[in-house]
Amino acid sequence: MLKDKTILIMGIRNKWSIAYGIAKSAYDNGAKLLFTYMGEENKEKIEKLISEFEGSKAYVLDNAAEDELVREVFTKIKEENGKVDGLVHAIAHANTEDLHNDFIYTSREGFNHANDVSAYSFVLASRMAKELDMLNENASIVTLTYHGSTKVLQGYNVMGVAKAALESSVRYLAENLGKEGIRVNAVSAGPIKTLSAKGIKDFGSVLTEVEKRAPLHRNVTTTQVGNVAAFLLSEMSSAVTGQVVYADSGYNIMGI
């Protein structure tokens, strides 16, 4: 599906992450991969992680919500690799106390931080890619969201608000970039045991509930979510834009 395509994945962390699942599916479908990651101190770990993806490169981006940093890194990526055919945004963060306390106690700093890192960074990446003429014709942009954007899930709190902003951004960006033939979509993955998920209080009970109530009666894997993202990055989804595509074993359709 992605033969001769170059895909930039922002936010790779480890082999248990959704970003890694997307990378593996994209690579298995023929894509050349580029990555951004946080922290120069993680360079050796990241290079080892992506070594199985032959020809891939990784670039440090310490703050994906800072305009000039993103411009600098994207400029370097384009200079060294040319334009890309796909951009995957796999970046989100909220302060631990804002996930463990009731949402009403979210601080101004915590609210701004979660939305800045988790939602604005997506708008910024899309804008910089456009301004730097970094995207090939018919390029696809994909981000990651979660069901907590539309339903109240205990412990998700301010991240749910940030994901709601992210999903709305997907729709507005799809309209803006559609004029240039660029598609913008989100994958709403079911709960997965990632490093980020460990910050959610009582996360194990969420996995149990999904397995019990989802129509397919199972949780999803990073591979399954990666395959959905690869589809959205490919020309097989050329008629799809502005959508939130659920990859959650159908859990989102269930009522009481």
Image: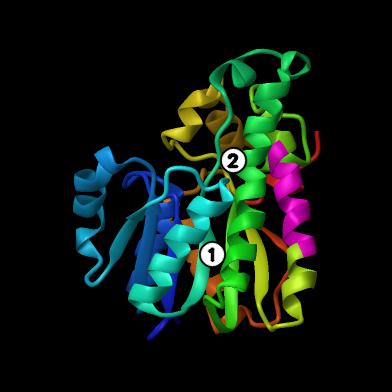
Q: Residue 144 appears at what percent x and percent y?
A: 58, 52
Q: Amino acid at mark 1?
A: Val
- Would you say residue 208 is visible in this rendering? yes
- Would you say residue 31 is visible in this rendering? no
Residue beneath disc 1: 228
How far is the residue under mark 1 from the one under mark 2? 24 Å
Residue at 31% over, 58% down = 58
Residue beneath disc 2: 117
In this view, 61 is above or below 85? above
The residue closer to the viewer here, 58 or 76, is 76
The residue closer to the viewer here, 203 or 70, is 70
Callout 1 secondary element: helix
Q: Nearer the viewer, mark 1 or mark 2?
A: 2
Span of residues in magenta: 162-172
Q: Is residue 228 left or right of residue 185?
A: left
Graded by Cα atoms within 10 Å as few (under 14), some (14 to 19) or many (20 or more), the crowding at tag 1 reads many
Q: Residue 203 appears at what percent x and percent y?
A: 53, 25
Q: Residue 48 appears at what percent x and percent y?
A: 19, 52
* Secondary structure, magenta segment, majority class: helix
Residue at 46% over, 59% down = 72
